[in-house]
Amino acid sequence: MDNGTAVAEEVTERIHTLETAQAVQTATTAGMESTNAATTVGLQATQAAAQAGTWAVMTVGSVSLIVGMFMGMTIAKINR
């Protein structure tokens, strides 16, 4: 094997190493972006559920207040 062939093989090996490193970096970036997207979706779902729960509690409270007022008026009329 002459010196030219050895240099060519070394260059080929270095290119292969760089290609492998680039593929790993690309996969890492894709994984990071997927994780970030999943986290964002999870946060949005949590916020939506909390908002729905808040509105449900407010609705039940309002309905209970109105029903209680009418019951109070009815009881007051009955006791006259």
Image (tube, helix red, strand yellow):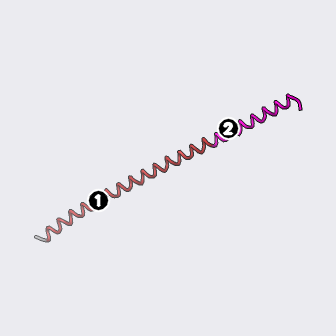
47 w.r.t. 77: above or below? above
Q: Quadrant of the C terminus?
A: bottom left
Q: Position of residue 7 (x, y in %)?
A: 82, 30
Q: Position of residue 5 (x, y in %)?
A: 85, 31
Q: Main secondary structure of the magenta part?
A: helix
| Residue 21 found in image quarter | top right
> Does the magenta segment cover residue 9?
yes
Report crowding for label 2: few under 14, some 14 to 19, many 20 or more residues within 10 A (C-alpha).
few
**What residue would you read off at disc 2?**
22
Q: Position of residue 14 (x, y in %)?
A: 75, 34
51 w.r.t. 30: above or below? below
Left or right for 30, reference 69: right
**What residue would you read off at disc 1?**
61
> Does the magenta segment cover residue 45?
no
The amino acid type found where label 1 is placed reads: Gly
Left or right for 1, reference 13: right
Q: At x 66% / y 41%, what residue is drawn?
A: 24
Q: At x 46% / y 49%, what residue is drawn?
A: 43
Q: Choose between 39 and 21: the one closer to the eye.
A: 21
As drawn, the residue found furthest toward the right would be: 1
Callout 2: SS: helix
Q: Position of residue 78 (x, y in %)?
A: 14, 71
Marks 2/1 in contact by CB < 8 Å: the verdict is: no
57 w.r.t. 28: above or below? below
The numbered mark, 2 or 1, whose residue comes first in the sequence reads 2
The amino acid type found where label 2 is placed reads: Gln
- Total marks shown come to 2
Q: Choose between 13 and 59: the one closer to the eye.
A: 13
Nearer the camera: disc 2 or disc 1: 2
Q: Which residues are magenta?
A: 1-27
